Amino acid sequence: MRLVQFQAPHLMGPHLGLESGNGGGVINLNAFDPTLPKTMMEFLEQGEATLSVARRALAAQLPVLPRSEVTFLAPVTRPDKVVCVGMNYVDHCKEQNVPVPKEPIIFSKFASSIVGPYDEVILPPESQEVDWEVELAVVIGKKGKRIKATDAMAHVAGFTVAHDVSARDWQMRRNGKQWLLGKTFDTFCPLGPALVTKDSIADPHNLKICCRVNGEVVQSSNTNQMVFKTEELIAWVSQFVTLYPGDIILTGTPPGVGVFRKPPVFLKKGDEVQCEIEELGIIINKVV
């Protein structure tokens, strides 16, 4: 299933829906069952009960709202946390001439950086070095602490596409070289278009992943290049923190980012960034 949060002119506030296929229209889940919550966070917290309603809705051949009539929101908004992983692609490590990490490198973005799949990315006046990073995002579906890698997928609701927009000056030189500020300006975490449930993906660690800037391919790899896979990341992170439904894990970016180009290339006003992952979909964000 392809779960979405959306708005439409004839509906009050955000609603939950099903995308009728990659790039398709939207089935309004709240119209199918008015008792369903209207946010993905509450939907995920209710677990199998709400998922089974969504599966029934998918089978029911319901009316589909055309894509042109809806506004897609990020599939998850206001999660408890956005956990990020640095240097998690073998080929991205090679690009920087650094060794492959022996254990995951974890940082975070604040949830206030999340925007929708087609929203604008705002260049902050404080940075001159804003860069792109396409990433596979994992969405947690079940609470857990000290989760074993062998049990980890039971805690996953699904996957979505993320753009880990990064201000390299603040990440690499300012703020004592702590990465947080450079990663968490407003609008620096576009997500979407849908939360694709794990049962709909054959293998999340064998998906083509790419990023285009103004139509030019800048990143092109495969999630099979990930150093630490989803299961290992969940086991590692849950040693330190409790994972809650709706929590998002950005699993790292492949090579091709702007900062390591010679000379470096950064995003500018008017650019359009497309982040695409096979089976999950594409998010398109204009830079303003």
Image (cartoon, rainbow, N blue to C red):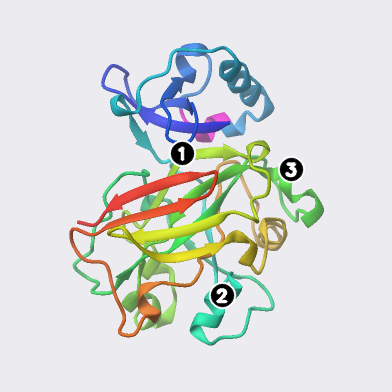
Indicate whether residue 52 is drawn in magenta. Answer: no
Crowding at dot 1, Cα within 10 Å, few <14 / some 14-19 / many 20+, comes out as many
Label whose residue precedes the other's in the sequence (1 or 2): 1
Against 138, residue 19 (above or below) is above
The one of 12 and 259 positioned closer to us in this rendering: 259
Q: Is residue 76 visible in the rendered structure shown here?
A: no
Return the x and y of residue 204 as percentages of the image width and height.
64, 51
Q: Are marks 2 and 3 in contact (CB under 8 Å)?
A: no
SS at badge 2: helix
Instruction: State the separation of the CA atoms marked 1 and 2.
Output: 29 Å
Image quadrant assignment for residue 156: top right
Residue bounds of the magenta highlight: 39-43
SS at badge 3: helix
Residue 58, which numbered label? none
Q: Which residue is mark 3?
A: 154
Q: Which residue is mark 1?
A: 75
Residue 91, which numbered label? 2
